[in-house]
């Protein structure tokens, strides 16, 4: 159990307290990666090696955010990570920067409390410094929770990537232009 003193002291990496005051959103550090990997392994079938997380953290730290319980701010209960890609725009061969959602997950025990919404709402503006024109992601066609979540931010389905996942499930490819983003 946390004390009142702990509750009142902001974590050194705290960025934002959302509408749910029990949780904080903060930047990830190298020390947090084991906690992130634990949440990922529990909540998603896609696992990545440690160096993958580390390279995302080293390259795009602004988009690698954690949700932690205010009373235990070192314990990761949710995370989001983005990478930046430079690819041709749909209309021309002009190269544009896109934010590509690598992964988001919230520990089951803490779901439906607005944590994922807050992770998205904080991380998307945070990576705007890379001159992002569009945010893109893939999501399992059966993942209604996540699809609903993305629609809240105005993401729209652009197509299907057949057998995108290792187990053969298809993915929706979704995107939203920076100017259309609902924050
Ligand atoms: C998807 C996930 C990240 C949502 O996390 P969360 O913190 O529970 O989400 P929030 O509480 O912020 O919910 C935001 C919105 O998402 C949608 N949503 C979340 N869970 C939902 C559910 N079980 N059923 C339907 N919609 C849901 C709703 O639109 C919700 O808004 P509302 O509460 O106003 O209705 C979480 O379910 C999770 O970690 N799933 C496993 C990992 C995963 O699938 N990641 C996505 C990979 S693409």
Image: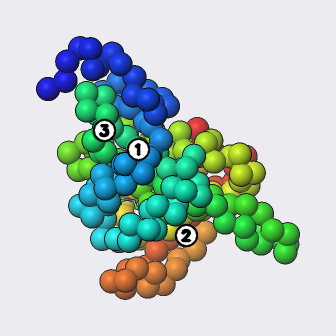
Q: Report x, y in % for residue 165.
A: 40, 79
Check whether the beta carbons of the residues at disc 2 and disc 1 lie within 8 A of each other.
Answer: no
Check whether the beta carbons of the residues at disc 1 and disc 3 lie within 8 A of each other.
Answer: no
> Pointer 2: residues within 10 angstroms few (<14), some, or many (20+)?
some
What residue is shown at x 50% (from left), y 68% (from top)?
138
Distance from label 1 to label 3 (Cα)?
A: 10 Å
Residue 173 badge: 2
Q: For residue 157, what is the image quadrant?
A: bottom right
Of labels 1 and 3, the one closer to you: 3
Q: For residue 143, what is the image quadrant?
A: bottom left
**Dot 3: element:** strand
Q: How many marks?
A: 3
> Pointer 1: residues within 10 angstroms few (<14), some, or many (20+)?
many
What residue is shown at x 38% (from left), y 71% (from top)?
49
- Viewer can see residue 4: yes
**Dot 2: element:** strand
Q: Report x, y in % for residue 23.
A: 34, 31
Q: In this figure, which residue is indicated by the disc labeled 3?
A: 74
**Which quarter of the rendered picture does the N terminus lie within?**
top left
Q: Report x, y in % for residue 70.
A: 31, 28
Q: In this view, does 42 lie to the left or right of 157?
A: left
Residue 161 badge: none
Distance from label 2 to label 1 (Cα)?
A: 24 Å
């Amino acid at each position: 159990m946390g004390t009142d003193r702990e509750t009142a002291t902001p974590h050194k990496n705290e960025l934002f307290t959302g509408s749910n005051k029990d949780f904080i959103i903060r930047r990830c550090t190298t020390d947090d990666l084991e906690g992130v990997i634990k949440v990922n392994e529990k909540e998603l079938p896609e696992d990545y090696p440690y160096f993958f997380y580390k390279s995302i953290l080293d390259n795009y730290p602004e988009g690698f955010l954690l949700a932690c319980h205010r009373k235990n701010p070192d314990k990761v209960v949710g995370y989001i990570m983005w990478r930046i890609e430079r690819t041709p725009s749909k209309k021309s061969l002009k190269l544009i920067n896109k934010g590509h959602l690598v992964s988001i997950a919230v520990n089951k025990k803490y779901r439906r409390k607005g944590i994922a919404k807050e992770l998205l709402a904080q991380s998307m503006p945070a990576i705007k410094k890379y001159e992002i024109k569009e945010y893109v992601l893939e999501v399992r066609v059966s993942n209604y929770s996540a699809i609903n979540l993305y629609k809240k931010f105005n993401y729209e389905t652009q197509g299907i990537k057949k057998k995108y996942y290792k187990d053969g499930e298809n993915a929706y490819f979704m995107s939203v232009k920076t100017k259309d983003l609902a924050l």
